[in-house]
Amino acid sequence: MPSILETQKPPDHSNVACHSCDKLFTLPELRHGQRLRCTRCDSVITDFSDTGIQRALALAIAGLVLLFSTFFFPMLQIEVQGQTSSINLVDSALMLFANSNYILGSLVLVFILIVPLVILTAIILLATCMLFQYQSEKLIVVARGFYLIRDWNMVEV
């Protein structure tokens, strides 16, 4: 039985557009350390590196640690006449629920807490499996789910 990677079509050298100026390029074969730059705007179109998976894994783990820190450390702290009041992201969602703002509380909970947690977990799972060359049909579902929800990440807001 062929593996998952063998059943996929090999990448063809089709046209790729520059993300900055939309100039079309035909992708050449790249060797380790090479970069393809746009001749019009000099932005990087693609590069070839052996450490991309390790970097993605390290950044996702760091992002997960920082996301968990936002769950517990105060996001806003106010001190008035010696009294201090602070709130973190989880408390902000719970306060919205307590004040009968169920829709806004749900939006904060889902798009600022749950979706980023799912995205970072998916990146860690996929990068770890790629690093150790583990193949499973279930990883395709995880990857497709990741690409479906990645645009709904609202942590920046």
Image: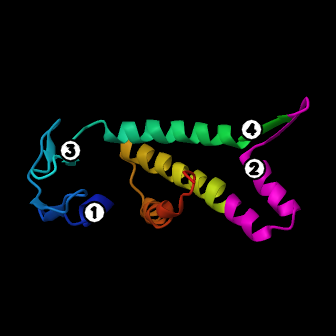
Q: CA distance from mark 2 to mark 1?
A: 46 Å
Task: Say whether disc 2 or disc 1 marks the residue closer to the N-terminus.
Answer: 1
Is residue 75 placed above or below 108 in the rendered structure?
above
Q: Which residue is mark 4?
A: 74
Answer above or below: position of 66 versus 133: above
Label 3, label 2: how many angstroms apart (C-alpha)? 39 Å
Q: Is residue 84 visible?
A: yes
Q: Nearer the viewer, mark 4 or mark 3?
A: 4
Q: Nearer the viewer, residue 55 or 69?
A: 69
Residue bounds of the magenta highlight: 80-109
Q: How far is mark 4 from mark 3, CA to CA? A: 39 Å
In the picture of the structure, the residue carrying the numbered disc 3 is: 47
At label 1, which amino acid type do we have? Pro
Give the percent coordinates (x, y) of residue 13: 11, 61
Alpha-carbon span between mark 4 and mark 1: 51 Å
**What's the distance in space between the residues labelled 3 and 1, CA to CA?**
29 Å
The residue where tag 1 is placed is 2
Q: Residue furthest top?
A: 82
In the figure, is residue 153 to the left or right of 132?
right
Give the residue type that dot 3 points to. Asp
**Tag 4 and tag 3, C-beta contact below 8 Å:** no
N-terminal of the two: label 4 or label 3?
3
- Is mark 3 in CB contact (under 8 Å) with mark 1? no
Label 2 sits on a secondary structure element that is helix
Mark 4 or mark 1: which is in front? Answer: 4
Q: Residues within 10 Å of mark 1 (few under 14, many from 20)?
A: few
